[in-house]
Image (cartoon, grey):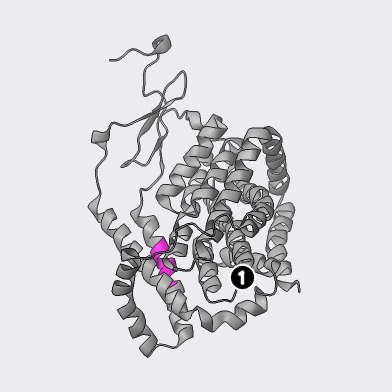
Amino acid sequence: MPAYPNGARAGGGTASISKRFFRASARRDTGRIMMAPPAALKINWRKVGIVLAALFLFILAIQLLKSGARVIVPFVQLWAGSNPLNALGFGWLAAYLVLSGSPIAALSLTLLDADALNVVGALAMVAGSRLGASFIVLVVGFVYVLRGHSRAESLSMGLLALLTTFLVQIPSLFTGYLLLQSGWFNNLPFTADGPLFSAVEAIFDPPITLAESFLPRWAIFLLGFGVLWYSLNLIDRGMPHLHLRESAETRRPSWATRPLAAFALGLGVTSITLSVSVSLSLLVPLAVRGVVRRGNVIPYIMGANITTFVDTLVAAILLNNPLAPPVVLTEMISVASISLLILLLAYRPCERALLSLTDAISASNQTLAIFLLVIVGVPVALMLIE
C-alpha cells in the first residue's frame, strides 16, 4: 500500500460523484479528491444513443420553432416586446412555469429571429430565463421536506440558488447591455454556413416542409416547443447520473471549502449535464447528507450559471442568424465577469449577506410565503410596465 503524509491512508470518508464517470475518495487528513483510474471508466452505449437521439430532436425542435415562431409575434409583442423590462419579466415567469430555463432561452432566440424581439429584448429574456431556472431547486427542496428531511438544509439550497442567481444576473444585465451595444461579438464567425448548415438543411428541411404542409403555424410552434422540452429532458437522461454514494463516515471534499475549486466544479458539472436544473438540484441531497455546507456552494452555483448557456449557444448557431450568437456570448461573458469579480474581491461579505438572507427567509412559513410572492410578483410587474 502506498505511503501518505502523516501516515494517512486513502479511502477514509468518501464522497463520490457519478459512479460510472467519476469516483473520488477523500483522505482523512486533507480531504483531497482522488480520481479513479481511466480503466474504471466504461462507455455506456445506451446513453450515447440517447444523447445522439436527443441532439437530433434538439436540432429538429429549433427548426420547428423557427418555422412557427411568427404566429406568436403579436402575443410576444404585447407582453414582452414593448421594452426590455417586459422581456425580462416574460422570460423569468416562463422559466418558473416550465421549471427550466433552457427552453425559454432557446425560445427567446427564435423570437429574435422572427423579429418579435430586438437584440436587447432577447438578451433580457435570456437573462430572465436564468433568473427563473433555479426555481426547480427550491421545488426539490420542498419535496425533501415532505419526505421528512431537515427543513433548514433542504430549503436553504433552493433559496441560495435563487439568491445567488439574482446577485449575479441583475448587475450582469447592465454589463451585458454595454457589451451588446459595443458590437464586439458581431463579426465572429458563429453562423452555420458551409457544409454544416447544408447538412442541417438536407436532413431537417423535409420534415419541416412536411409539417408546414399539414399543420397550422401555431401547431408547428407548439410541436417545436414540446420537442425542445423533451429533447432537453432526454439529454439529462443520457448524461452521467451525478449522485452521492454514502459511506460509514462522510467527509467534505476539498472543493467544498475552496471557492475557486467549487466555481470550477460548477462549470464542469453543468458543461457535462448541459442543465443547471440537474447540477443545482444535486446540491439538495448533498446538503441533507452533510457533504456540503450552504456557504460552500455559492461559487458552485455561480459556475453552473455560466456553462448552462452552452446548449443555448448551439441553438443560436443553428438559427443561422448573425444576431443570435452575440446575445448568448454577451450573457455568458457578463455573468462570468460579475461572478469572478465577486469571488476575487467580495466573496466573504457576499457569502455572509446571502446566508443571513437565506436564514431570514426560511425562519418561518410567513417569511417564506412573502419571498415566494415577491419573486413571482416582480416578473409579473415587469411585464406590465409600459
Image x and y of residue 44, in percent: 25, 49
The reply to whether residue 141 is in sight is: yes
Residue at image coords 52%, 47%:
304
Residue at image coords 74%, 68%:
381
Image x and y of residue 125, in percent: 61, 65
Which corner quadrant of the image does residue 56 belong to? Answer: bottom left
Q: Callout 1, which amino acid?
A: Asn
Principal SS element in the magenta part? helix
Which corner quadrant of the image does residue 331 belong to? Answer: bottom right
Identify which residue, 84 or 323, lies in the foreground: 323
Q: Residue furthest right?
A: 386
Label tally: 1
Quickly name the residue at label 1: 118
Q: Dot 1: few (<14), some (14–19), or many (≥20) neighbours within 10 Å?
A: some
Does dot 1 land on a helix, a strand or a loop? Answer: loop
Residue at image coords 57%, 76%:
115
Q: Which image quarter holds the N terminus? A: top left
Identify which residue, 299 or 179, lies in the foreground: 179
Question: Quick check: is 78 in the magenta stretch?
Answer: no
Image x and y of residue 92, in percent: 62, 63
Q: Which image quarter holds the C terminus? A: bottom right
Identify which residue, 123 or 252, lies in the foreground: 123
Residue at image coords 68%, 65%:
379
The reply to whether residue 157 is in sight is: no
- Looking at the rendering, the stretch of residues picked out in magenta corresponds to 226-232
Seen in the image, is 153 located left or right of residue 52?
A: right
